[in-house]
Image (cartoon, rainbow, N blue to C red):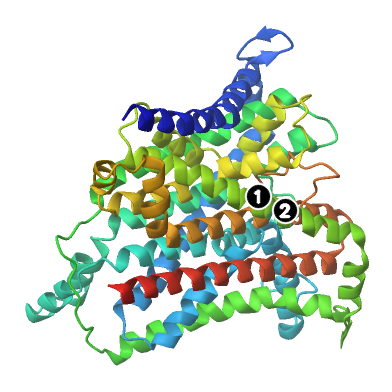
Amino acid sequence: MLKTNKMMKIIFLPILFFLLFFLIVPLLFMFWQSFKIGNIFTIQNYLDALKNIEIRRSFFNSFKVSFAASVFTTILAFLLAYAVHFTTMHRYTKKLVHIGITLPMLLPTITYGFVLIYTFGNQGILTKLIGQPLFTVYGYNGLVLGYVLYTLPVAFILMQNSMQYIDKRFLLVSMLMHDRPLRRFYHTVFRPMLGTIGGSFILTFILSFTDFGIPASVGGNYRVIATELYQAMLGSIVHFERGAVISVLMLVPAVLGVVMLTILERFNFQYKQAGKSELVKHRLRDGLFTAYSIVCVVVVFIIFSTMFIVPFTKGYPYDFSFTLEHVQNVLSEQDLTKVYVNSLIVAVLTAVLGVAITFLSALLNARTPLKGRKSLDLASMITNTVPGMVLGLSYLFFFNGSSLKGTFLIIIACNIVHFFTTPYLMAKNSLQKMDPTWEVTAELLRDSWLKTVIRIILPNIRPTIYQMFSYYFLNAMVTVSGVIFLVSTKTMLVSTRIKELQHFAKYTDIFLLSIFILCTNLIVKLGCDYITAHKEKVKEMSK
């Protein structure tokens, strides 16, 4: 028993040190910096920031555009999830919806803005077909549309995950009782989903409010708080104190969002046993939702299709002749291929080390009686709250002048911390569902705790580990806001290089690099999904 406790502590202490050194201390240091002018401790920085009309306008703009995008996204995602789970829409159409809506997740958000420009801009593909622009893509319109594209996959996944646990037998009971359609819908679908709807709105709002990629490409003169922070730290005149203050202000909506999410938990439903029931066919309803779902997927495909058209034309928008010249140019540029290799190195190391840290953290919390293990839940809550730009800036302040500055190590550490919450919760939920007596039985058989973990727990949690790896890899490949302040010329990544190429208007290079990211992420995701499905099938057959 003493040996087991010692082993647990040996694993726990490095993880605790890692989270303290790469999460808590940098954030506290940044918070401290926001109160400093030279060597003086004062609140003057906050007073100056609140008096600054540009910061106030940017904050209000961020709130306004994020609120609008969240309303649209929540409605669209709810209707799509309803179409998948509560209509008799063809199963292939349902699969198409799932693939089409979630596909943009495999691209950096900065690419979203460029595809919008090439679709709806003055020289855009749709503009060419229609004859005139449908709307001004720069500023408010482009930001709302970009944020909807960015947050729709997340909201849709949340909605459909919750809807699959709704007991459909209540629909049948409501029909037998001759309830009106609206009353039936409210009590059997909307009311049980209220917590998820609220959670989806808050999550999409926070994601939109803190995103940097989309404003960087289509923001134009419509300043938001993320671009204000970027200008403060990487503009022509650097304002460290202002950057620290803006970072703290960016935390306010995120913290309020987490508080709101805990309040909304009371609305979450729970059935003792979720029953399955065949849905009643309704031609008008099924036809309308099928049409709506197909339109949503087609719109997403049309918008992102520009990414696959522009790089393979000789001189868009004047010459549409097919060519591979741009591809050859990109592949021949050592600088661009080096950037792509950098991204692969960072993504693989982030995934491997991230899975190791999050799995061990979840294991210590869920399967051991170790004192202080609940601090890992607190770390998970903090990482879920802190935006990527704020975390990256805290690293810039704290590690400035150290040997870690401008290295792959600091980028990997930032990614692991930034995306810690989801893989940690995935592992924790899986471990909590496993038989709690395994360790006791192993101890009675004189097996060590570590041997039990390797021989019994690891094989049973392997599918979850593949999903954790996939999550870390994909996000490390596409993140912009988390690493924008940390990359150097030697550690430049594809997602941050896209921002650099924007200044030189090299949009064909941008789209080709985005295609490389998309293909890489698709291979990894499909590979992980296939292995997971195969392992689950083998597990079921063995039963």
Amino acid at the residue labelled 2: Ile
Amino acid at the residue labelled 1: Leu
Query: In the drawing, what numbered circle is on residue 345?
Result: 2
Q: Residue at x 65, y 54 (%)?
A: 348
Residue 490 vertical placement versus 537 (above, below)? above
Q: Residue at x 80, y 76 (%)?
A: 310
Residue 435 vertical placement versus 243 (above, below)? below
Which quarter of the picture shows residue 52? top right
Query: In the drawing, what numbered circle is on residue 102?
Result: none
Q: Secondary structure at mark 1?
A: helix
Q: CA distance from mark 1 to mark 2?
A: 6 Å
Which quarter of the picture shows residue 249? top right
Observer-nearest of 169 and 531? 531
Neighbor class of circle 2 (other Cα within 10 Å; few <14, some 14-19, many 20+) is some
Report the quarter where the C terminus lies: bottom left
Relative to 52, 438 lies left or right:
left
| Percent coordinates x, y for residue 206 in the rendering | 51, 47
| Percent coordinates x, y for residue 27 in the rendering | 58, 27
Relative to 137, 79 lies left or right:
left
Q: Which residue is the site of mark 1?
A: 349
Q: Tell me if residue 305 can be seen.
A: yes
| Percent coordinates x, y for residue 159 in the rendering | 37, 63
Q: Are marks 1 and 2 in contact (CB under 8 Å)?
A: yes
| Residue found at the very far left of the displayed protein | 177
Relative to 205, 457 lies left or right:
left
